[in-house]
Image (tube, rainbow, N blue to C red):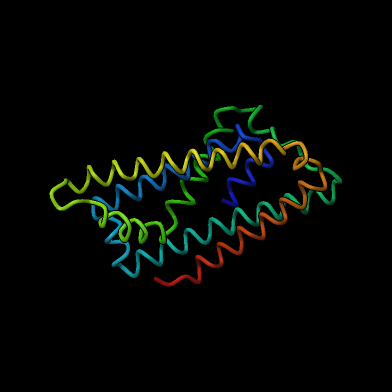
Amino acid sequence: MALIMRRAALRGFVGAVPTVLGLEAGLYLWALFAAAGLAAMVAASEAAFIVLRVIGAGFLIYLGVKAWRTAWQSRKLGSVQEPTEDLLSNPKRGWWKPFGEGALVMLANPKAAVFMIAFYPQFVPADRPLFATTALLALLQVAVEIVLYLGLAAVVGRAGAWFRRPVIRRRLEAVSGTVLIALGLRVAAATR
């Protein structure tokens, strides 16, 4: 949510779409991994769980520090660089970078693997194929979440001009950086 809201506030609705799709692509992959048994191996393996936890925490902290750095630099300069620089200068990079961030945040989240293992099996009837049924259920979940998150991005994006004012943007960067670092620390300290 923090990633989506930050992206929508600073880049508008269009800028948030790839982040939402990246997060949901990562979630869908975890569902497929759960159906294939890979997520169960991650949940059962202490080492794999720790590796994912460290990677996930590190990436969230990296994103948070990056936001703090932007806020700090803009304080020195008195303004914040225009939010459309990477979208306008290189549209392909402008789309793939937030998509990749969203996917990596979800794939590096060991709690997503554990959730998928705990959630989906109870909805798969014994006489149905596990992989196909899980894939279909996950597709439904992803579709619902995409609609909800894009709705949130649209609402936040409508207030984008206000969020992009230099003082507000600097504060938003600092707050979102703090939230992302706190989430990273929480993931780092998480146990099964």
Residue at point 76% right, 36% down? 161
Q: Work out whether 96 lies above or below 27.
A: above
Dividing the picture into quadrants, the one containing residue 118 is bottom left
Q: Work out whether 135 lies above or below 51.
A: above
Which residue occupies the foreground of this view, 96 or 19? 19
Residue 6 percent across, percent down from the top left: 64, 46
Horizontal side of residue 184 vs 119, given as left or right: right
Instruction: Report the number of discs.
Output: 0
Dividing the picture into quadrants, the one containing residue 108 is bottom left
* Residue furthest right in the image: 78
Q: Work out whether 10 lies above or below 63.
A: above
Dividing the picture into quadrants, the one containing residue 192 is bottom left
Which residue occupies the foreground of this view, 51 or 33? 33
* Residue furthest left in the image: 127
Residue at point 40% right, 57% down? 112
Residue 68 percent across, percent down from the top left: 71, 55
Residue at point 75% right, 43% down? 163
Residue 16 percent across, percent down from the top left: 58, 38
Residue 33 percent across, percent down from the top left: 30, 50
